[in-house]
Image (tube, rainbow, N blue to C red):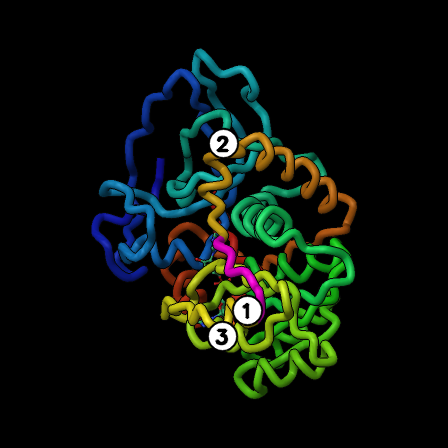
Amino acid sequence: MKALLCKKFGPPESLVLEQVESVALDARDVRVAVHAAGLNFADTLMIAGQYQVKPGMPFSPGMEMAGVVTEVGSGVTRVRKGDRVMSTCVYGGFAEERCISEDMVFPIPDEVSFTIAAAFPITYGTTYHALTDRAALKPGEWLLVHAASSGVGLNAVELGKLMGAKVIACSSTDEKLQIIKGYGADEVINYTQENIRDRVLAVTAGRGADVIFDPVGGDVFDESLRCIAWEGRLLVVGFAAGRIQQIPANHVLLKECQIVGVNTAQFIKHKLEEYRSRFTMMLRWTAEGRLRPLISATYPLDQVPQAMAVVMARSVTGKIVIAIR
Ligand SMILES: NC(=O)c1ccc[n+]([C@@H]2O[C@H](COP(=O)([O-])OP(=O)(O)OC[C@H]3O[C@@H](n4cnc5c(N)ncnc54)[C@H](OP(=O)(O)O)[C@@H]3O)[C@@H](O)[C@H]2O)c1
């Protein structure tokens, strides 16, 4: 089978497409013929050696994928050959085959394409976890979303609206803000041109944002602490800006707010069945048109480096999918 390989940590251009041997199946594993794989910001960190997971060399990047089960191990009970499935596989998605535990594959309804399913688990799984388990977002609350056209950000706008929140969305260009408005944001802020604190306080009549979804970090996090509401929850989702911020504890005291970490890997480790059941629900919402995953581009397997360059240039909206079959 063909696989895109990272042989040593480096930039996207150092990835190579090679023919590799198929691996043997463990008893609880299934073999998936990968049809499509979602590209995430974290893939660019993993190949550079800057992500918390550092696989042994060589490895294929690709944190999520969708395809058809072609073989099941002797101890597999919940999946059958021929099933259409998607998976949060952490790495190995940018290859024609991926062997993975049956617990980590989730059924895809017929109405949902492989392309949509491949781009689903990481960002929708993280965002739902963040807004419910970590922030306990309530109807009528103000939700401020940073990088709101990103993979996780656009999902936060959509899910926030479905949960009954009033959404303020921030992004760096007016073109991105147009897309976000189409997903129901109540207010938008171009945070390269406008002051986040001033606009949020104006929009919320001085209250501030009850929940802040922050995949950006750095200066954006610092500004967020200046416009969070009393008893607000600030979700630390990622550090796309590149600077891991320090927390001034005096702001936490003054606002009686919470700084809340979001780590989907931990949620999967501790509450796998809950994580699985959410996909049944959210894929049904997708089939019904209540969720509208945005796939802004697809690339073939041999053009993953070009696709990663788009992500690193801050140019992606929604998700990019790698088409493998
Ligand atoms: N905690 C978790 O479990 C978890 C799960 C999934 C993702 N994440 C994290 O969430 C973040 C976003 O992931 P994603 O896959 O949704 O990303 P993405 O689609 O590639 O979007 C990243 C966005 O961040 C903003 N940004 C601000 N400064 C940037 C910079 N210097 N370079 C690049 N982008 C910059 C950009 O939006 P604007 O141009 O609008 O500012 C960009 O569109 C990443 O840090 C990722 O690691 C965390």
Residue visible at 57% across and 32% down? 106
Q: What distance separates the C-alpha of mark 2 from that of mark 1?
A: 28 Å
Decide if residue 299 is in sight here. Answer: yes
For residue 277, above or below residue 288: above
Say if residue 297 shows up in the picture: no
| 1 sits left or right of 56 in the view | right
Mark with earlier residue (2, 1): 2
In the image, what residue type sits under mark 1?
Ala
Residue visible at 51% across and 56% down? 260
Does mark 1 have its CB less than 8 Å from ligand 1? yes
Q: Which residue is mark 1?
A: 147
Residue 220: numbered disc:
3
Q: Of marks 1 and 3, which one's residue comes earlier in the chain?
A: 1
Gap between marks 1 and 3, in whole Å? 10 Å
Q: Earlier in the sequence, mark 3 or mark 2?
A: 2
Q: Which residue is mark 2?
A: 104
Is label 2 in a helix, a strand or a loop? Answer: helix
Range shown magenta: 255-261
Looking at the rendered structure, the secondary structure element under dot 3 is helix
Q: Nearer the viewer, residue 160 or 79?
A: 160
Residue 314: where, in percent of width, then height?
A: 46, 71
Q: Is residue 25 shown in magenta?
A: no
| Badge 3 residue CB within 8 Å of ligand 1 | yes
Q: Nearer the viewer, mark 1 or mark 3?
A: 3
Q: Closest to the observer: 184 or 211?
A: 211
